[in-house]
Image: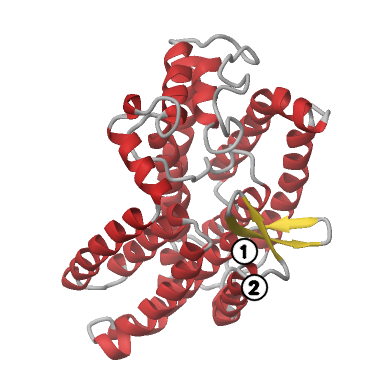
């Protein structure tokens, strides 16, 4: 199949994306209205901001849908340099904006965004390009494996310093998965995982709040007012919903009981208001998203498209699994939002941009 042959994009993928964004907008208003009214005297505050970012994100989606995705391969190095520079810049006091002790945002005038969101997409593009160019050299450490590991380490390391361990670790897992599928031997992968274990232990032990989160994961009831508070409130919300939920807008946990109800912990509010059926609907939508994304990856016309489609799909689905798992007390708290659903402008915009690339690849898949 030549690059000049195009057909319709994957409409199932697009429909699922729209459904998740619309679902998210409804739930963001429901989960945040009381908090927004108290903090900003405007119950629509978070909903309005998310609408604006959704418009920006869908604009990016359609632009990337129309262009041939191969142009990204030509600019992969430029994108990784820009991402690296912005991640360094965010740690400075010039443009970096600190919120809750973390330097993750850059503010330019009225616009504030997280460079790590651009870095995630840029790194996946760079790795897909690297595999396309140097797959045959992955058996050699110095010429094949070391260069890409250095780039991965720099990007993930800067995100970790912000600090954002959840994003750094999940991005590292996705990148390692891409390298394994792209030809990196199981011996190298196993060695990297073994080396990461003591580093992970050190990172957890070096920060008291990370250690508290881990202890709360094992036994949240041992510290119900502090370390275990958020997960306990999340479980109460999920348990209160029953099969059909208490009704849209009728959540009690969003009445300032559950912290981050419209961001990282929006899934429990969905479970409380819409019940098991509502929560299962979200899981089903992400399952369909994963299925369509993997189909696009398998049918891509070249290795670059296949690796990039697989990486983007894995990144979005893994973040969703971790977010919902944390809400159900299956994983320690990571601070990762629910893609396309949680409040968060730059995450929404760059996730939609990534889906635009997926849809572009689907236009050239081999039928």
Mark in the foreground, 2 or 1: 2
- Picture quadrant where residue 68 is located: bottom right
The scheme the figure's colours follow is secondary structure
Give the structural element (helix, strand or loop) at label 1.
helix
Determine which of the numbered discs, if any, sits on residue 138 in the image. Answer: none
Near-viewer residue (142 or 218): 218
Near-viewer residue (83 or 106): 106
* Residue that appears at 47% across and 23% down: 233
Determine which of the numbered discs, if any, sits on residue 89 in the image. Answer: 2
In the displayed structure, would residue 343 be above or below residue 101?
above
What residue sits right under mark 1 in the picture? 115
Q: Are marks 2 and 1 in contact (CB under 8 Å)?
A: yes
Residue 111, how many percent across, how many down?
78, 57
Q: How many marks?
A: 2
Residue 51, how many percent across, how many down?
75, 40
Residue 103, how many percent across, how many down?
60, 60
How dense is the environment of label 2, judged by Cα within 10 Å: few (below 14), some, or many (20 and up)? Answer: some
Q: Work out which quarter of the rendered image holds the C terminus and state it.
A: bottom left
How dense is the environment of label 1, judged by Cα within 10 Å: few (below 14), some, or many (20 and up)? Answer: many
In the displayed structure, would residue 360 be above or below residue 333?
below
Q: Is residue 195 left or right of residue 210?
A: left
How far apart are the two marked residues, 2 and 1, measured between alpha carbons? 9 Å
Residue 13, how many percent across, how many down?
54, 44
* Residue that appears at 48% across and 15% down: 275
* Residue that appears at 63% across and 72% down: 86
Near-viewer residue (366 or 93): 93
- Residue 16 visible, this orientation: yes
């Amino acid at each position: 199949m030549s690059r000049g042959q195009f057909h319709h994009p994957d409409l199932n993928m697009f429909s699922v994306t729209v459904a998740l964004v619309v679902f998210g907008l409804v739930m963001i208003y429901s989960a945040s209205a009381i908090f927004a009214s108290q903090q900003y005297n405007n119950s629509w505050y978070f909903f309005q901001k998310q609408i604006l970012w959704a418009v920006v994100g869908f604009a990016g989606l359609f632009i990337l849908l129309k262009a041939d995705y191969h142009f990204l391969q030509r600019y992969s190095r430029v994108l990784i340099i820009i991402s690296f520079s912005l991640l360094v810049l965010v740690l400075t006091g010039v443009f970096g904006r600190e919120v809750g002790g973390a330097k993750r945002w850059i503010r330019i005038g009225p616009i504030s965004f997280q460079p790590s969101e651009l870095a995630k997409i840029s790194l996946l593009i760079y790795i897909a390009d690297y595999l396309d160019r140097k797959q045959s050299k992955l058996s050699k450490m110095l010429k094949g494996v070391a260069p890409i590991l250095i780039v991965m380490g720099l990007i993930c390391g800067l995100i970790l310093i912000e600090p954002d361990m959840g994003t750094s670790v999940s991005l590292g897992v996705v990148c390692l998965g891409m390298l394994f599928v792209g030809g990196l031997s199981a011996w190298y992968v196993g060695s990297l995982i073994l080396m990461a274990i003591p580093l992970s232990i050190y990172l957890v032990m070096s920060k008291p709040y990370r250690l508290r989160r881990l202890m709360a994961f094992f036994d949240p009831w041992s510290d119900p007012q502090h370390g275990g508070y958020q997960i306990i409130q999340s479980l109460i919300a999920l348990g209160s919903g029953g099969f059909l939920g208490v009704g849209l807008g009728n959540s009690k946990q969003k009445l300032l009981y559950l912290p981050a109800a419209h961001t990282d912990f929006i899934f429990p509010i969905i479970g409380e208001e819409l019940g098991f059926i509502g929560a299962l609907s979200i899981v089903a939508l992400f399952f369909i998203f994963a299925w369509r994304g993997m189909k696009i990856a398998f049918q891509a016309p070249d290795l670059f498209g296949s690796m990039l489609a697989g990486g983007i799909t894995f990144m979005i689905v893994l973040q969703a699994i971790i977010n919902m798992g944390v809400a159900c007390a299956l994983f320690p708290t990571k601070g990762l939002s629910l893609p396309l659903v949680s409040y968060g402008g730059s995450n929404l915009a760059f996730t939609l941009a990534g889906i635009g690339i997926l849809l572009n690849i689907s236009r050239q898949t081999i039928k």
